[in-house]
Image (spheres, helix red, strand yellow):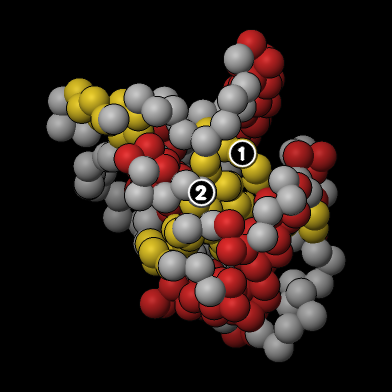
Amino acid sequence: MIKKIGKRTLILENKPAIISYGSIVGKKEHEGPLSNEFDSYIEDSYFGEESYEKAESKLQTTAVEIALKKVGLEKEDIDNIFAGDLLNQCIGSSFGLMDFKIPFIGLYGACSTMALSTALASLFVNCGAAQKAVAVTSSHFCSAERQYRFPLNYGNQRTPTAQWTVTGSGALIIGDGENLPYINAIIFGTIEDLGIKDANNMGAAMAPDDVKIRPYPTNEGMVFFYTQIQYLRGFRALFKVFQRSK
């Protein structure tokens, strides 16, 4: 059952639940303020592989395996997998998930791919098209640099506004469950052109609030980012309280 509000909002009346999750990040992310929230991390950017792209595929494989292991599920228990990454043709997802032999829906939403995959997996479970579905995405700093900017071995000088892409992968298993966090509603956004001309300042183009930040690092900008980290921590605490109340 789905109730539609306006053009973009869908209320999922069966409330598909997040029954498990898995995450793995790079060394830099592991050293950050959210370190304790991740399941695993890597020290080597190659993750034991021959290229950064293969390393990114392995990140997705690992995140899904962690999520399955937490709840004792096998790959055969999953009906569909919704996945995407930042590479051409979504090759990170395609090669990372190929051996699972799970019906695959490839997605590209850039930084919104995790939200997009979760929304579509929830829709499938809500309407009965799937009993259990996986939503997973990944990014890798080194593969993203080669994709969008300059290969690292080129030695190009980074601009003050250049973004640092996360190295990591996260996976959610969506299904039926009680006393678990659930997806109540989803909203699909529209495309907005904010008039950002700086190709190296993608953050401002993607997030309206970032437009208010000066284009180069300032104390004001650092306060903003610190505030966002505190906001995420507060949201996580609220989420846990909400989970306990169900």
Left or right: 69, with 165 as reference point:
right
Q: Residues within 10 Å of mark 1 (few under 14, many from 20)?
A: many
Q: Is residue 163 visible?
A: no
- On screen, 150 above or below 106? below
Q: Quick one: 232 or 20, which is closer to the camera? A: 20
Residue 97: give x, y in percent of width and height. 56, 72
Which image quadrant for residue 234?
top right
x, y percent for residue 109:
37, 56
Q: Residue at x 58, y 57 (%)?
A: 77
Q: In the current view of this chain or complex, which residue is farthest to the bottom?
A: 50
Left or right, residue 30 beside residue 234: right
Pick out the residue farthest to the left.
7
User: What is the three-letter code of the residue carrying label 2?
Assistant: Lys
- At 39% from the left and 64% from the top, the residue drawn is 105
Q: Earlier in the sequence, mark 1 or mark 2?
A: 1
Q: Does the image show residue 193?
A: yes
Residue closer to the observer: 34 or 127: 127
In the rendered image of this protein, does residue 147 appear above or below residue 78?
A: below
Picture residue at 31% right of the left edge, 26% below the top: 11
The image's mark for residue 165 is none
Q: Position of residue 103 (x, y in %)?
A: 44, 67
Q: Quadrant of the C terminus?
A: top right
Q: Tell me the residue at 44%/28% (across/down).
A: 15
Mark 1 lies on a secondary structure that is: strand
Whether residues under marks 1 and 2 lie with C-beta atoms below 8 angstroms apart, the answer is: yes
Q: CA distance from mark 1 to mark 2?
A: 9 Å
Label 1, on which residue? 19
Instruction: Give the residue pinned by disc 2.
Output: 132
Farthest top residue? 245
Q: Give the class, few, some or many, for how many residues have Cα within 10 Å of label 2's Cα (few <14, many ≥20).
A: many
Q: Amino acid at mark 1?
A: Ile
Q: Quadrant of residue 106?
A: bottom left
